[in-house]
Amino acid sequence: MSNLNSFMGGVRIPAAEFQKHSPKLRAEKISAPDFVEIAYARTTKPTVSEGDSVFMGQLLCAADDKNPIHSSVSGKVARIKLDDEGNVTSIVIENDKKDTPDPSVIPFSRKLTETAPDEILEIIRRSGICESGDGISVARRVECALGGTRRLIINCTECEPIISARHSLLLEHPAEVINGAKILLRALEVRYVDIVVDNNDIAVIRRLEDVIGNNPLLRLRVTDNKYPQGDKRLIVNAVTGKEPPVRETTSQLGYVVFTAETAAAIFRAFSQGMPQIEKTVTIGGDCINSPKVLTVPIGTPLSDIVAFCGGMKGEAKRIICGGLMSGKALPDCDYYVSKSDTAFIFLSEEYVKPKSTSECIRCGSCVAKCPMHLMPLYLAKQSEKGNIKKALAMGLRSCIECGTCTYNCPAGVEHVYHICNIKAAYNEEKAQEENR
Amino acid sequence: MKNSPEFSSPHIRSGNSELLVSLDFLIAALPAIIWSAIAYGARPIAIIVVTMLFAILFEYLFSLLLHKAPHLPIAAVVGMLTALFMPAGIAYWLLPLAALVGVAARRFTGGILHPIASALLPLFFFGSQMTAHTAIFEKLKLGVFSYADKMDELAVKLPVSVLLPENSPNITAFDVFLGNSPESIGGMSAILLTLGGVYLLARRVISWQIPVGFIAGASLIWFLLMFDGAHYDYLIYHLCSGSIFLAAFFGACEYSSSPTVPMGRLVHGVGCGMLTMLFRKLGMNAGMSVLLAMLIMSLFSRILDMVTAERYFGYHTQKLPERFKALLPDFKK
């Protein structure tokens, strides 16, 4: 176990303020929903049609698809939803509550040491695991990293308040995470894995230390509990001391970061053979009667989750998919859990502070707190003007939209909003240029 | 949903607000203001309150005129700091003018012209108002409703405005440090200002770079000029004067006119301190030298930000010219 240097800046969000709205750490399983709606965002046609009966874990799309999706329950395909252009957007499956597994679901029986990296990749690819948060296919990242990996990092930090699904996983099933890390170690052929945890939960560190024991392949590294320590680039920087250039992804440089959930999901794909059909999410916030860490099948409607958590106290003014700092707001409860979701937070009016549309007073707190050493006041100003060139000169590419600038701003300037807008405009411009 | 600032992340705030920041400035200045009231009577309080009220009024009018959100607490701080730099005997009719110029400088130049310095500079065109300092503890002569004409009779020379030792009044450097000598309203007692400054530093309202840079810069230039026959005693004398501390902890730290990058702030502080002492060496009035130094340095605040900014994370080649271009106004439109 060794302590790591953290980055400059960042914020310490007072977790105590949100403690009573945070869930108990023990993960519960939701009672099976009557219907699940699985998002189907790909170009190929689904392999099932309306009225077909499906098994739990059955493949719903073509077998050679890059990131396959599976039925999370057994039952009957009730509807295949199409958008205006005739593309399939989602598949609704009626649950027969028998949980009959697909015949193809068989545990991996061979020894890991006798398995080639390609075979491991094939199993990861078949299980359709997605990274939590950004929703990138894990198989694709493993494929890119195969052979050229210098460091493998398992991200076990959790620095946003309320969200505790990862802590819960690490407390209850540390062995799954560690075994998943060992599988990745084998696949990527690196010498050792860095397991990064933050220093605010001693229990997690103890549990991991117990499981790791004296294994030289696994190194436990402890970082400061500071937001946004969980960012990929900042974790790579903390572990290796290197600064990933802004134009390259960390995996292109040979530093591969996976989250603890991904590692556990990979282990489950091996030990049970079941593809990723469920996700552990945090349900919290002051509007929820009993906050919980819940394991839900992919495609569960959010309204079912709310009902399982004892319903809502009053009206939720804001429903956030993701963390309080970086999550995105949902318009209503009409949402179905996807593989990349980590948390759903329901906030009442008390926490939703009115946002002022005030200008900068140049206090400099955003500059002092920016983990990427940017000057958010100038960047936001240029972004607000819509000046892409100048925003790029101010370091637009470096911005990770963590929100520390806006969190601290005494004047209430919406840096992140302006920066997100100009990033979208920049990407659009770039796409147009490529088309030409 | 996505394209509304109301729903963009982050969904929580630290609870820091303009009002809190402004209250911190007020609390920090309170010991100095109280000491000034003890020494001069109620008149300094009246000057501060009137200037603050006018500053708030003008800020509100400007915000209506420009259809922008008003920054009333920040304007109140500008008004208060402006009043702190004024002599106790200043005429009341000058206060609205000072508040107007200060708030306008913040509003229209964004602090490129130092609001407090530009607020006080026009006052020099009105005779000797900026030197209307009076002897302390003469409350009867200096009432709240005293006329400005009377002030000329009462006016005294500031100890720090006299540079040669033989002209020095019978006041020791320690007296100046404690505040037992005439000065501007806020700048009487260096020790009380330091107390306020430490409070601001502890609350992280200001950063240490500007005050430390200011005092260091002032000392440095004096050591450099010492070879020209100046006396070492005078460094102590000046460095103990309240006007230096008022500028170091309050004036130069004014948000809109100071750089935002830590390194830039240090350079800004050193620049202000050096220029102040240089102007004093050249025989300029003590209050005026501080203001002019701050005004000149505030012109460079944006450039200092760009030059001293840290390398952005992941940008391995630093491109200064591009950053400077980001400063320039857009000519195409």
Image: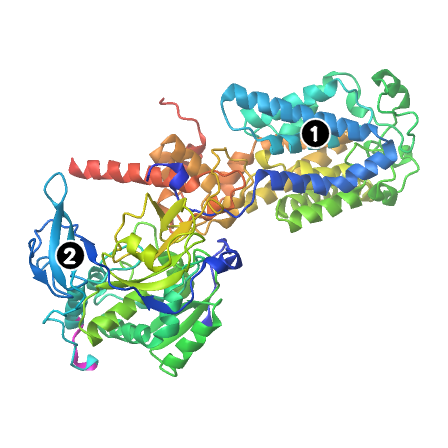
Q: Callout 2 environment at 10 Å: few (<14), some (14 to 19), or many (20+)?
A: many
Give me the disc on residue B82.
1
Image quarter for residue A432? top left
Q: Nearer the viewer, residue A41 or B303?
A: A41
Residue drawn at x 42%, y 39% is A379
Asked if residue B139 is positioned above or below residue A373 in the image, the reply reads: above
Amino acid at the residue labelled 2 = Ile
Left or right of B297, for residue B306: left
Asked if residue A109 is positioned above or below residue B315 in the image, the reply reads: below
| Rendering coords of residue B85 (x, y %) | 74, 31
- Subunit ID for the residue under disc 2: A
Q: CA distance from mark 2 to mark 1?
A: 70 Å
Q: Which residues are magenta?
A: A113-117
Give me the disc on residue A93.
2
State which quarter of the image contains the N terminus of chain B: top left
Q: Callout 1 environment at 10 Å: few (<14), some (14 to 19), or many (20+)?
A: many
| Rendering coords of residue B31 (x, y %) | 78, 42
| Rendering coords of residue B228 (x, y %) | 77, 38
Amino acid at the residue labelled 1 = Thr
Left or right of A228, for residue B213: right
Image quarter for residue A425? top left
State which quarter of the image contains the C terminus of chain B: top left
Q: Is-magenta flag for residue B129?
A: no
